[in-house]
Image: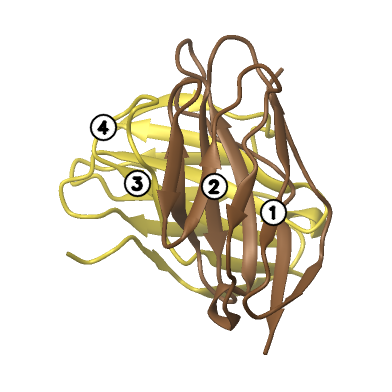
Chain colours: A yellow, B brown
Amino acid sequence: KAGVTQTPRYLIKTRGQQVTLSCSPISGHRSVSWYQQTPGQGLQFLFEYFSETQRNKGNFPGRFSGRQFSNSRSEMNVSTLELGDSALYLCASSLGTGWRETQYFGPGTRLLVL
Amino acid sequence: GNSVTQMEGPVTLSEEAFLTINCTYTATGYPSLFWYVQYPGEGLQLLLKATKADDKGSNKGFEATYRKETTSFHLEKGSVQVSDSAVYFCALSPNSGAGSYQLTFGKGTKLSVIP
């Protein structure tokens, strides 16, 4: 079974631009979560989607948004990029939602904001 | 709120040495506990998990025991290999409530194993 895939793998943007990242979960998985990884803050939860509904959201500004499609694929969008948004963005999928589920992570999209 | 504290790295060991990476947590109730590993250029892989007190998670020679009394989940391996070189993350997930599917991670511990 194919793992979680994320596209693109690398991205360079300039301040003020917006960016959209894509995540395709493991086949059959209905939950997708997003995390931001930076050297300073470590891994931080952004949001979780299940059956096209946002179930949980981390402490990030409204510039960060996401959505999930009927095939469980998910996108996250960051508007008005800032230098501090440079990070590795990780997507994780699981069969369902809830603490019993194991999250499987993709390789990440590395975003550099200049 | 919930938090995870793990030992600062980097940790450098010789092949076949014993490994311990300390992890303690703060959480309400009884969270599930996890160890994830990140190899260079890759995403996170689940290494092992424990969902209740005194549970022992194990995988690939790694072990960790959920100690409620000390709020700890230390990772151990009896004999490390060069291929174990990676960054190790301790994490928790609440077992109930609105944040029940939000993983809280420690800062990570980089392990380098030299031949």
Numbered disc 3: secondary structure: strand
The residue that mark 3 highlights is A93
Distance CA(mark 4)–CA(mark 1): 33 Å
The residue that mark 4 highlights is A96
Quadrant of the rendered structure where residue A61 is? top right
| A109 on left or right of B108 | left
Image coordinates for residue A77, horizontal then vertical, percent: 53, 49
- Crowding at dot 3, Cα within 10 Å, few <14 / some 14-19 / many 20+, comes out as many
Image coordinates for residue B56, horizontal then vertical, percent: 46, 36
Amino acid of disc 2: Trp
Decide which of B51, A101 is in the foreground and name it: B51
Cβ atoms under marks 4 and 2 closer than 8 Å: no
- Residue at image point 71% right, 75% down: B112
| B31 on left or right of B18 | left
- Crowding at dot 1, Cα within 10 Å, few <14 / some 14-19 / many 20+, comes out as some
Q: Chain of mark 2?
A: B
* Dot in front, 1 or 3: 1
Residue B91 vs B42, above or below: the answer is above
The residue that mark 1 highlights is B20
- Crowding at dot 2, Cα within 10 Å, few <14 / some 14-19 / many 20+, comes out as many
The residue that mark 2 highlights is B35
- Residue at image point 36% right, 24% down: A98
- Residue at image point 32% right, 34% down: A101
Numbered disc 2: secondary structure: strand
| A114 on left or right of B23 | right
On the rendered image, what quadrant is the C terminus of chain A found in? bottom right
* Dot in front, 3 or 2: 2
Distance CA(mark 4)–CA(mark 2): 20 Å
Distance CA(mark 2)–CA(mark 1): 13 Å
Whether discs 3 and 2 lie on one chain: the answer is no
* Dot in front, 4 or 1: 1
